[in-house]
Image (cartoon, rainbow, N blue to C red):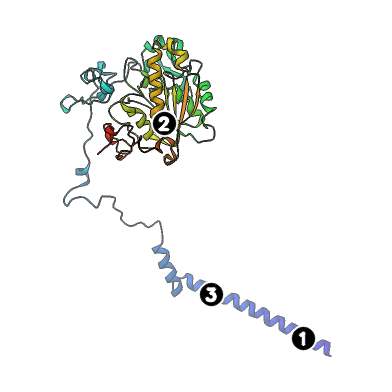
Amino acid sequence: MAVKASSVDNRTRSTVSLCIVIGMCCFFYILGAWQKSGFGKGDSIALEITKRTDCTVLPNLSFDTHHSKAGSSSSDLVSPVKKFKPCPDRYTDYTPCQDQNRAMKFPRENMNYRERHCPPQKEKLHCLIPPPKGYVAPFPWPKSRDYVPFANCPYKSLTVEKAIQNWVQYEGNVFRFPGGGTQFPQGADKYIDQLASVIPIANGTVRTALDTGCGVASWGAYLLKRNVLAMSFAPRDSHEAQVQFALERGVPAVIGVLGTIKLPYPSRAFDMAHCSRCLIPWGANDGMYLMEVDRVLRPGGYWVLSGPPINWKVNYKGWQRTKKDLEAEQNRIEEIADLLCWEKVSEKDEMAIWRKRVNTESCPSRQDVSTVQMCESTNPDDVWYAIHVQEDEGLCDTPSRCKR
């Protein structure tokens, strides 16, 4: 009897549970249908939130400027595009601030006539400089390092004047650049290898370089593959196409010269400065040009001088200068470098390398204050068209040059 009563209770509980589940299902079904019908308050709230956040419903947007003067329209603020006609073909090589006819009117002292001399307002041209006839798009890098279309820079004089130095060669309708230079006829790569034996180029210590008197900028072109970016400059002289060659090759370069005006670069901008027979009189003007190199070199940076007067005892005949003249020039350079607190780290063959000390306070040449006086320095970064004033430089080797 007990077993039968237990089985009846179990069936009763199962029936009750089933009824509860069915009832709940029906309840929630009816509740959902009621909310979906829109009569549910919660659903109304949800619907309102959905409308407010619906990204497909955009307000009326206005893209007009809201800072114009009252009564002016957006069309009034747009300046008309000014169109310029092309200049005559004779202006193909015209560089406004480097015009040779104007340059010859300025004094030759300190290379003043090779500096920028822009035309007055009444002489300015208002036309587009035409490209050379047949100009084509330059080759992509790295092919452009070695080849330039002849039509882009149609000057053959350097192929004759610098033939034995491997600056540039004319082949068919292109110029080929073997990578040579006056001081590295065997190629810039081998020359840079020689530098790298003294200067830590491979480890990233040197990242920026300044090439003074760059020629066709092969030194800067071959430094690029060593992750060193060089800025090259040269005057527009008898080799008028040298900077143009550099630009067509894809190497950063400007027309420029070390003269009466400071270089247009901030102080401590370069890790290395380089002169490969650049013909700059480094010992002249009380060391004014070396002081300018010192300004743009970072502490610990390197200055490379390749060519005269280095190793003059062996090369004076080839340079067609007297021993006395070359010896005096090198002695003066050594003296100025010492006063600038540079340390000579290498001299081999025709190349000498100095390093700017990191801490000038420990400079041996400045320990004796009776022989070396310091001037009041001007702002080293105020260089745009700033003229060299020797009395304002940071170093004085004679009392007469110091500011009182």
Q: CA distance from mark 2 to mark 1?
A: 116 Å
- Disc 3 marks which amino acid? Ile
Dot 2 corresponds to which residue? 338
Location of residue 51 by image quarter:
bottom left
Label 3 Cα neighbours within 10 Å, binned few <14 / some 14-19 / many ≥20: few
Residue 128, placed above or below residue 15? above
User: What x and y, as percent, mark residue 373?
Assistant: 33, 37
Q: CA distance from mark 1 to mark 3?
A: 33 Å
Q: Is residue 85 left or right of residue 342?
A: left
Q: CA distance from mark 2 to mark 3?
A: 99 Å
- Disc 2 marks which amino acid? Asp
Label located before the other in sequence (2 or 3) = 3
Dot 1 corresponds to which residue? 8
Label 2 Cα neighbours within 10 Å, binned few <14 / some 14-19 / many ≥20: some
Location of residue 203 by image quarter:
top right
User: What x and y, as percent, mark residue 379?
Assistant: 30, 40
